Image (cartoon, grey):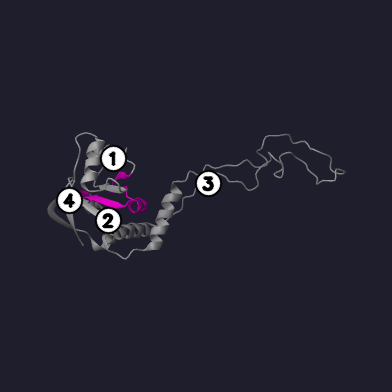
Amino acid sequence: MEAKVLDFNGKDTGRKVQLSDSVFGIEPNNHAVYLDVKQYLANQRQGTHKAKERAEVAGSTRKIKKQKGTGTARAGSAKNPLFKGGGTVFGPRPRSYSFKLNKNLKRLARKSAFSIKAKESNIIVLEDFNFETPNTKNFINVLKALELENKKSLFVLGDTNKNVYLSSRNLKGSSVVSSLELSTYAILNANNLVLLESSLEIIEENLSK
């Protein structure tokens, strides 16, 4: 499929690029997308939750009342989970939520995400640009030129560009990543995908393996 190339003022440069059908034109695999997004979100969890169990609760270990003759159930410790201030039964413990996915499935998920965005006509190809210094106002002007100031957008750079990244960092609705940092979640979480020309070759090369 073909896509026209815009400049950072939002004007057509008169050039077009060919987007690979093997990356931007496949039949999306929804289950692969689900698994990749699930893994991404699982990896964001710290897993540091912890509840004190019976052996970890502070308190005396003496028998709190005699065994018989009270008319109530026997009780041996104030740390009993049945009592207020006692230990937690089967409480959460620190753990890792991460799980493994093979590389081919993750590639399929990313290609599916790109194809979904292409099908929805939510991909913009932008010629490479740079700022002399980090400047949020300049980045906002680019968003306005592309009519993205009120939409959630993801800019994909061919290589790390510190000035462009720092210019976007204060903006809640926009984010900037390099083509090697792309994730299925990031692609789908944005309303519009802005691909700089230099990123296209890297993306297609990485996903065509």
Measure how far apart labels 1 and 2 are at the Cα level: 20 Å
Judged from the image, the secondary structure of the residue bearing numbered disc 3 is loop
**Looking at the rendering, in which quadrant would you find the N terminus?**
bottom left
What residue range appears in magenta?
173-198
In the rendered image of this protein, does residue 95 appear above or below residue 20?
above
Q: What amino acid is found at the position of numbered circle 1 in the picture?
A: Ser
Reading the image, the residue beneath label 2 is: 122
Residue 184 within the segment the image draws in magenta: yes
Residue pictured at 30% horizontal, 46% vertical: 150
Residue 204 rendering spot, x and y as whole percentages? 25, 56
Please state which of the two labelled residues, at mark 2 or mark 3, is closer to the viewer.
2
Residue 2 rendering spot, x and y as whole percentages? 19, 60
Q: What amino acid is found at the position of numbered circle 4 in the picture?
A: Leu
Q: Residue furthest left?
A: 14
Counting residues from the N terminus, which is met first, the one under dot 4 or under dot 1?
A: 4
Counting residues from the N terminus, which is met first, the one under dot 3 or under dot 1?
A: 3
Measure how far apart labels 3 and 4 are at the Cα level: 47 Å
Q: What amino acid is found at the position of numbered circle 2 in the picture?
A: Asn
Reading the image, the residue beneath label 3 is: 95
